[in-house]
């Protein structure tokens, strides 16, 4: 269940919390993007940066923070539209995670990660008019303008990676009483992710710090999402999949041909007999051949059948088209929420196909008589909207209930995502 990042006792930006514009898919998934107090200057390393000193933890805030640590909640950070990656080593290989945990529990003590070590991977771009080349991408805000003399200022930097290492460091709140945000911490900070020392206690504040380092990388702009899409040891074996599909199609074809020849031979035999001979033969039949006289009989509820077939075709078409567009790369992972938005869009557009199929089945059942097709075309979208309305109403009620029980007022959902 996603919750607001600022529902926990974290540092608040000096200009206040602001929400970013989001699409429909992000809103439905609960991915609310908010600004963060962390400050980055392009290709400028900073260390021992004091962020803030929180207020003494009230009993409610202390209990909530412990609950989030027990539930292993993650904080998601975004820089230049790239989620923060955290690497952990297990045996001889590295695991890749997005975001970092709020804290960790060791025995009966709870420790919070109050120091973040950021590593920003940048790639040099040699072009006097780099902003024009990048177009409307969000990286143009951090690329310097080119100089007219063609000097070194013509080179721009593009963010191609964003990594974070969380640390739990014991800070003395008394040492930073007079410090302001972004001041230098009084002592040197050494981030060691293998040890924890900042335990949380009731009625005691938490001091937050961070450091930023920029590293030049060989990763180019079109390949900067490879680290997020790459899955270790999970290669798709297309040859095996194609081989299995061909075997299935071959066996299904053999069975289909056998059944087709058998049914065709039986139907030819029945058509050559008169009614008295058919009745006598039916007494001797068993199994599926007993329904020979019911095959071409209209169903008792043809309207319901047409509606269900139309809705099934719509859902199947939506799934196939969405997967096809995602496989072809039209739904980029850089645009969060596009998958959900695309599913809803294709679901609505393919309602035309659902209405056509429903009316087509109705006409087939009525042996070419299309009277009553207006009722079918109306019931197809009407029955389709009922489950959607029920789900939306239930989700809205759940949001209001959780928000009211959590803060006593309405709050937007988000996964602790900050920009």
Image (cartoon, rainbow, N blue to C red):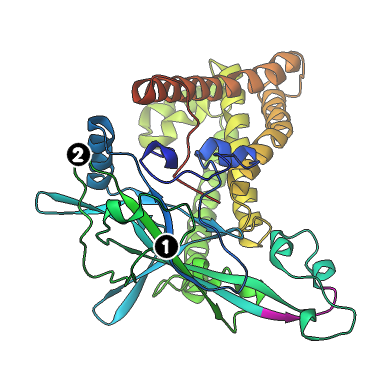
Which residue is tagged 1? 210
Q: Position of residue 257 (x, y in %)?
A: 54, 56
Magenta span includes 48: no
Q: Is residue 66 found left or right of 34 in the rendered image?
A: left
Magenta span includes 125: yes
Residue placed furthest toward the left: 107
Relative to 293, residue 241 above or below? below
The answer to whether residue 277 is visible is no
Q: Nearer the viewer, residue 223 or 251?
A: 223
Highlighted range, magenta:
124-129
Q: Residue at x 71, y 20 (%)?
A: 377
Relative to 61, residue 99 above or below? below
Element carrying mark 2: loop
Residue 380, labelled with which disc? none
Q: Residue at x 61, y 17 (%)?
A: 303
Q: Residue at x 45, y 44 (%)?
A: 415
**Quadrant hosting residue 302:** top right
Q: Residue at x 52, y 62 (%)?
A: 249
Residue placed furthest toward the right: 148
Relative to 204, residue 92 above or below? below
Rounded to the nearest whole Å, what is the CA distance between mark 1 and mark 2?
Answer: 23 Å
Q: Is residue 15 found left or right of 170 in the rendered image?
A: right
Which residue is tagged 2? 202
The answer to whether residue 79 is visible is yes
Q: Nearer the viewer, residue 129 or 88?
A: 129
Q: Is residue 361 found left or right of 393 in the rendered image?
A: right
**Quadrant hosting residue 128:** bottom right
Q: Nearer the viewer, residue 76 or 14?
A: 14
Q: Position of residue 414 (x, y in %)?
A: 48, 39
Q: Residues within 10 Å of mark 2 (few under 14, many from 20)?
A: few
Badge 1 or badge 2: first in the primary sequence: 2
């Amino acid at each position: 269940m996603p919750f607001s990042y600022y529902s926990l006792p974290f540092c608040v930006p000096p200009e206040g919390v602001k929400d970013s514009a989001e699409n429909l898919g992000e809103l439905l998934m609960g991915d609310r993007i908010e600004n963060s107090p962390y400050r980055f200057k392009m290709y400028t390393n900073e260390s021992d940066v004091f962020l803030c000193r929180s207020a003494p933890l009230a009993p409610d805030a202390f209990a909530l923070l412990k609950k989030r640590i027990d539930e292993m909640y993650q904080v998601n950070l975004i820089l230049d539209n790239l989620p923060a990656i955290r690497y952990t080593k297990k045996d001889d290989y590295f695991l890749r995670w997005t975001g970092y945990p709020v804290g960790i529990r060791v025995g009966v003590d709870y420790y919070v990660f109050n120091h973040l070590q950021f590593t920003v991977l940048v790639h040099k771009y040699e072009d006097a008019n780099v902003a024009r080349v990048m177009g409307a991408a969000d990286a143009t805000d951090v690329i310097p303008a080119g100089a007219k003399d063609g000097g070194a200022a013509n080179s721009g930097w593009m963010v191609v990676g964003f990594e974070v290492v969380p640390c739990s460091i014991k800070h003395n709140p008394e040492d930073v009483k007079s410090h302001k945000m972004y001041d230098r911490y009084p002592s040197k900070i050494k981030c060691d992710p293998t040890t924890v020392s900042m335990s949380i206690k009731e009625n005691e504040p938490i001091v937050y710090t961070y450091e930023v380092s920029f590293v030049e990388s060989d990763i180019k702009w079109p390949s900067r999402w490879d680290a997020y899409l790459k899955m270790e040891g999970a290669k798709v074996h297309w040859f095996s999949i194609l081989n299995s599909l061909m075997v299935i199609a071959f066996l299904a074809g053999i069975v289909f041909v056998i059944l087709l020849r058998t049914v065709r031979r039986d139907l030819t035999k029945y058509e050559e007999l008169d009614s008295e001979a058919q009745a006598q033969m039916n007494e001797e039949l068993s199994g599926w051949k007993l329904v020979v006289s019911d095959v071409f009989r209209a169903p008792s509820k043809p309207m319901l059948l047409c509606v269900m077939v139309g809705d099934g075709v719509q859902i199947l078409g939506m799934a196939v088209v969405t997967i096809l567009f995602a496989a072809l790369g039209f739904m980029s992972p850089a645009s969060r929420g596009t998958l959900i938005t695309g599913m809803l869009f294709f679901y609505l557009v393919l309602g035309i196909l659902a209405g056509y199929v429903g009316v087509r089945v109705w006409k087939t059942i009525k042996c070419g008589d299309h009277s009553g097709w207006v009722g079918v075309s109306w019931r197809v979208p009407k029955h389709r909207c009922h489950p959607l309305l029920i789900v939306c109403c239930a989700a809205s009620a759940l949001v209001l209930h959780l928000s009211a029980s959590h803060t006593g007022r309405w709050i937007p959902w988000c996964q602790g995502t900050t920009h």
